[in-house]
Amino acid sequence: MIRDMVLQYAFGGLLAAFQDCRARLLEGAAEIRIRQGLPLILRTSCGGEAVLPYSPTARDISGMLDKMANSSLYAFDSEIKNGFITIPGGHRVGICGRAALEGGRIKTIRNISGLTIRIARQILGAGDEVLPHISGNCLIISPPGQGKTTVLRDIIRLLSLDGRHISVVDERSEIAGSHLGARQNDLGPRTDVLDAAPKAEGMLLMLRAHSPDIIAVDEIGDEADISAIMTVACCGVQILATLHGENVDDLRKKPILAPLISNKIFDRYIFLTNKPNPGSLKAVYSKDLEVVRR
Amino acid sequence: MTLQIAGGLLIIAATTLIGWDFSARGARRVRDLTELKKSLILLKSQIDYSIYTLPQAFSHISPRVAAPFDEFYAKLAKDVEGGADAASAWVSAVHSLKNSNLDKTDLENFAILGMSLGAMDSGVQINSIDMVITNIDDSLKRLLAENPKNSRMYRGLGIVAGLLITIVLI
Amino acid sequence: MDITVVFQIAAVGILVAVLNQVLKGAGRDDQATMTTLAGLIVVLFWIISYVSDLFGTVQSLFQL
């Protein structure tokens, strides 16, 4: 399946290179790194690498990106500003090249010299272990790459199936993996997705427009996010969010989180870890930062 | 004798009809060029919105224009959706318009548009479309001035040529 | 000598004149001139044998 997807978009020498590659390698890849003039690299989720003997040309790369965008890169303007586009299937294609600036900010990327295809794999059931601990406002915390988004995605799906109406503010298009506004991942039948909107503005918008039972966001980080959460929390809506972090001390150390913790906005702090799999439950803490389960 | 007359009348009829057809050609070309211009204006606004991909834009245009352009855009939408790159799909689709009432220069003008399709910048594409529309406007203006003259000429030519051939042969 | 030839030549003459006008009216002067020339050649083609007969007759008449 991954192989079909890749062959659908591959162009020029890349097409031959991927055709010759062993199917098993492609199916198991978590990332495909395409760099101009350098050998192709396939990475698996456990960190292993397979190097293919082909080095793509600039034309190969721009042709492939063109195919991914259906010859309509102009329509992906705002996504390219953020450095990636999302293709059908929810896979994210990171783009690098030469940034063109306007007023000091990135307007677009030209002379594309590299693509990083992150294969989206929705894992149904990733949230089973965490689901029983979801009550009230929950913050899911883990270091990068250890399953926060995958678990959040599945929790949203399970709660939605269970009858809760959920609004997702998908700022980085990772939860729903939307392609041109259409979600590529299964988030359940009672879920609304606002794609590519800043969390703060998006949360208030969804609150006003959709009267959800739950609002879900990924990777809260700045003051705007925090104050939006405080606003929304006082409106009787349940909040699900994720955060980068390793353990309880990280929570206490980040000054930005202080208002959230002192006002006991979150009822549960759920920590995830990589072992035995990404998204495994490590510990759960209550709103007072007391251990509930380890 | 009657055979000769019959043959003669046949020839005159044939050349007259050919003359009539030639005279209508100008009007048909005007009609097609106008329709083409309309489709390009639609394409421009679709790209301007910047939310529609090319296949979407093409399939929006297809039902809004008359033949042969409805099929032209429908085929384009299908080809690009299926993975062909816009530039080559455009060129081959323009090729299929050979049987339309458009003239060679019209088609070449139109085909050039394909090269800027799929550019990353919607501005580039819109400028190209504008250029083609301007060229079409020029052609239309010229045609509208020449057509009345030409159509009269072709009709007269048709009849006279028929008569001449008959006389020469009899 | 067949009287129809006279009518034929006359008809060609008239038609070529009409054609000339039509083409000139449409602004195609060079094509008008071409058709006039063509008509001339066709008529010449017809009468060339009669002309040669004429010269033969004159020759024999004056025993030249």
Image (cartoon, rainbow, N blue to C red):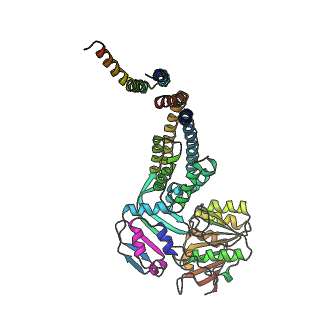
Does B50 lie within the magenta span?
no
Q: Position of residue C60 (x, y in %)?
A: 29, 16
Q: Position of residue A71 (x, y in %)?
A: 49, 57
Q: Is there any visible trace of residue A115 in the rendered image?
A: yes
Residue in front for this viewpoint, A169 or A286: A169
- Identify whether A80 is placed above or below A284: above
Task: Give me the residue at 55% from left, 51% from top.
Answer: B72
Q: Quadrant of residue A52?
A: bottom left
Q: Position of residue B140 (x, y in %)?
A: 53, 34
What is the residue that sits farthest to the left in this orientation?
Answer: C64
Q: Is there any visible trace of residue B50 in the rendered image?
A: no
Residue in front for this viewpoint, A33 or B12: B12
Tell me if A195 is positioned left or right of A19 in this view. Answer: right
Residue in front for this viewpoint, A231 or C38: C38
How many tags in the picture? Answer: 0
What is the residue that sits farthest to the top in this orientation?
Answer: C62
Q: Position of residue A123 (x, y in %)?
A: 59, 79
- Identify whether A155 is placed above or below C9: below
Residue in front for this viewpoint, B97 or A154: B97
The quarter of the image holding the C terminus of chain A is bottom right
Tell me if B148 is positioned left or right of A128 in this view. Answer: left
Does A31 lie within the magenta span?
yes
Task: Give me the residue at 45% from left, 72% from top.
Answer: A32
Q: Which residues are magenta?
A: A11-37
